[in-house]
Amino acid sequence: MHQQSYAFVFHQTFIFQKMRLTIKIGSNVLTRADGSLDVTRMSALVDQIASLRSQGHEIILVSSGAVASGRSELKHIQHDLDSVDQRQLFSAVGQAKLMNRYFELFREYGISVGQVLTTKENFGDNEHCKNQENCFKVMLENGVLPIVNENDTVSITELMFTDNDELSGLIAQMTHSQALIILSNIDGIFTGNPADPESRLISIVKPGKDLTDYIQTSKSSAGRGGMQSKSSVAARTAEAGISVIIANGKRDNILVKLLNDKDNTPCTEFLC
């Protein structure tokens, strides 16, 4: 399909049809510079998700932030634990804190939320996969908003996802979402360093487009992923027939703008 006709269909679909959306929020969006949970930003994103649900859209939320939240909560802990012990400890404490925040914020809108902690074992042709898929099905059928994260307390080494970008792509496919929105702390993929005024935002990525020359390989301090991971996941998910958008989760009202005025909202869209 040509880019022009596709963009029109995509835009019309977002406005006029109720959609099932997987939304991934990265650690850099949910945390402050000191690693603490940015409750103001989190609350704003909850407001937007509630607004989308009121329009009839179904939402599956993939949320990072547990490890960062736990780290900021356990400031008295000596950080000389090995990397596996740190991750298990901080995620165990941080996931409870993160879900409690979500529970309280969504309850103000009368929205029930459910926690889904998963591992790589739950994807593939096995009983774990079928059980997880059914879990999403029954939650959505009963109006419960699934909030998904990797189970970092038990996922180590080869059992870990690359990051929650990879997880969000798999969840979007498992739940048969029409679109995946990945929220980072920059507007999308640029032709160079986003801080360079000469760099331009790449708004549209056609199938098969090689972005190797444009991708920044550095990773954030808060999360495991980076733009390279997001680009790879977006391309694979788009190949599976799911529209993908990478956008800046720190922009005001970003989710509502993407669905109602995407053409005037900075983002990178991967065509499927």
Image (cartoon, grey):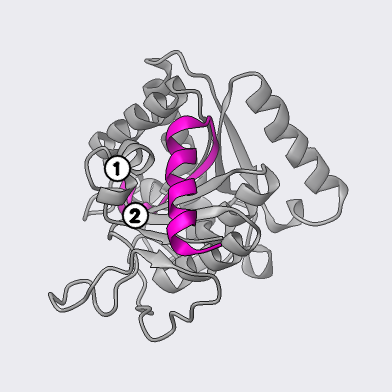
- What residue is at 55 percent from the left and 76 percent from the top? 208
Residue toward you, 237 or 102: 237
Identify residue type, mark 2: Ala
Residue at figure coordinates x 72%, y 26% from the top left: 138
Pinpoint residue 13: horizontal percent, then vertical percent. Answer: 49, 39
Q: Mark 1 or mark 2: which comes first in sequence?
A: 2
Quadrant containing the C terminus in the rendered view: bottom right
Q: Residue at x 42, y 28 (%)?
A: 52
Looking at the figure, which quarter contains the N terminus? Answer: bottom right
Quickly name the residue at label 1: 254
Mark 1 vs 2: CB contact within 8 A: yes
**Residue 63 visible in the current orientation:** no
Give the Cα distance between marks 1 and 2: 8 Å
Residue 269 lies left or right of residue 160; in this view the side is left
Disc ID at residue 118: none
Instruction: Give the tally of numbered discs.
Output: 2
Which quarter of the picture shows residue 236?
bottom right
**Mark 1: amino acid:** Ile
Q: Is residue 53 above or below residue 163?
A: above
Residue 247 circle label: 2
